[in-house]
Image: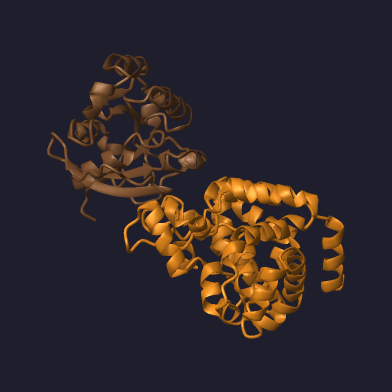
Chain colours: A brown, B orange
Amino acid sequence: MSGVVSFKLVLLGESSVGKSSIALRFVKDQFEDYRESTIGAAFLTQTVKRSDDIKVKLEIWDTAGQERYKSLAPMYYRNAHCAIVVYDMTEKDSLENAKSWIRELQRHADSNIIIFLVGNKLDLADSRVISTEEGKTYADTEGLLFLETSAKTPTNITELFDTIANRLPLDRGMGAKRAAQPGAARPADAPVQIGASAQPAQDSACNC
Amino acid sequence: MEHDISQTLPSLRLFEAGTGPLHEDLKNVLMAFAFVRADEASQREGQSIPDLFTLYEKYTIYVPGTASLAAMLLLNMTPAQALLALMNLISSKPWLKAMYKLGLRQSDSESRSSELLGYDRVFNALLAERMPEIYANLHKMNIRPLEYLHGWIQTLFVPWLEIDTVSHLWDIIFLDEGEATLFRIALAVMELLEPRLYVRERDELLSVLHGTNPAAIRIWRRESGSPDDQTPPRDQIYVQYMLTEQGVFRCLYAQDVWWKDLTLQRLLDRELNR
C-alpha cells in the first residue's frame, strides 16, 4: 500500500444532468457532446494533492440517473464520504429533483457525509432557467457546498474536486492510520461496517 | 464461484472483486450456502467429520446461477437474511428446487434429469400449444429446453432482463404460491422473441437465444450508438431485442385470456408422476 488515504465519492442526480461528464472531465480531462446514458454505475479513481500537500485518492461512483436504478442508490451512497448532487441549470424541474436527492441523503446517508450541490451546464448559461441565487440560497439553508460548473468548457471542475479533497477529514478515509485513536478498533483495511457511523468521539462533539 | 460472481449484474459494479461494496457479502452468502450443501452431502455420505475436498469433488456443491439469486436478494437485505431467503426461495419453488437439488457431479445429468425432464416436457407442451411453429422449429433443430430455458429459470431471469423488469418479475414470483408464474414468464419471453426464432440453422438459433448473435449485436450497436467492440451488458442480455418491462408485462396480462392453472396442474401431474 502506498499509504494514500482514499475516500468514497458518489455522483447523484437525475438522468442527463452531466454526472458522467463531470467525472470524465475530472478523471480523464475529456468531454463528449453526445454521451450514452450510464448503465448501472461506473467506477473511477483519481488521486489529488490537497493544499496541505497530502495526496488523497478519490474513488468516484458515477451512478445511473435513470429511474430504474433509483432504488439501488443507497448501495452506492452508503459509506460515502461525499455526495455530489448534480442538477441541470437549463431544466426547470432539475433543482427540485436534486432537492429530493438531498432529502434522501439527509435521511439515510452517513450523518457526516459532505453534500455538494452542483448546477451543471454553465456553458449553456444563456438558456438557464435556474439562477445562481436559487441554487446558492437552497444550498446555504441546507448547509451544503455549492458550485456551478461546466464539464464542457471546463469550468469549476477542478475547483469542485479540490474543494472536496480539502474538506475531507483525513482520519476518516479508508486506509487512514487510526493508531492514535483508542476508540477506533477497526483495522485500517477491514471492510467498513454498514450503518455504523464510525466515530463516537465525533458524534458527541457535534457542532449543532 | 468467483467466475459466477464476476458475471453477476456487472453493470451495477456492486459485486465486482476489489472495488464492489457488495462483493464480500455475496461471496460470504455463497460460501455459507455451499457449506449448507456440503453438510447435506456429508450426511448422505455418512461422514462424521465432513471431508470437504471429497464432497466438492463428488457433489454439485455450487450450482452456477446461485450468484444471480443471492445478488438480487443482497440488494434488498443483509447477508444473513439473504442466505435464509435464498434457501427458502429455492425450496419453495419446486422447479428451482429440482434445478438446485444436490446431486453427484458424475451422473449429474441422470440424477437431476428425470424431474427436470418432466418440467421440460410440461414447458414444451405449453409451447407447442401456444406457438406450434416455434416449437416445431426448435424440435427440428434439436434444441432442448436445457439449452435455453434452464438458464432463465436457474437465475430467475436476472442476467436476461433489465434490473427493474427482473425486480417486478420477482415480486410476482414471490407472491405466487403455485407454479404458474415461472411457466408464464418463460412463455412470455418466448413470445417476445418469437419473430427471431424462425431461423433454420441450429447454431444461429442458439446464438439468438443466448444473446450472442453477431447480426443482432451489430444492430444493437448501431441503434444504441455503442462502439464496435462493445457487447450488450451481460446482465440484461435480451435488451438488445428491446424486451422491456412494459412488453413483458403486457404479454403476461394478455395470457389471462387463455391461461388455465388447471391445465398446468394436469400437465405437471402427468409429466412428474405426482
Q: Is A65 rendered above or below residue B179? A: above
Q: Is A201 rendered above or below residue B177? A: above
Q: Is residue B46 visible?
A: no
Q: Of residues A62 and B26, which is closer to you in this image? A: A62
Q: Is residue B243 visible?
A: yes
Q: Of residues B221 and B18, which is closer to you in this image? A: B221
Q: Residue furthest bottom?
A: B106
Residue at x 36% of width, y 61% of height: B230
Q: In the rendered view, does B109 fall on the left or right side of A180? A: right
Q: In the rendered view, does A124 fall on the left or right side of B264? A: left
Q: In the rendered view, does A6 fall on the left or right side of B237? A: left
Q: Is B66 rendered above or below residue A23? A: below
Q: Is A102 rendered above or below residue B105? A: above
Give the x, y percent position of residue A191.
41, 50
Residue at x 26% of width, y 34% of height: A168
Give the x, y percent position of residue B26.
51, 57
Quarter holding the C terminus of chain B is: bottom right
- Answer with the quarter of the image where residue A174 lies: top left
- Answer with the quarter of the image where residue A22 lies: top left
Give the x, y percent position of residue A48.
18, 42
- Answer with the quarter of the image where residue B110 lies: bottom right
Q: Of residues B45 and B48, which is closer to you in this image? A: B45
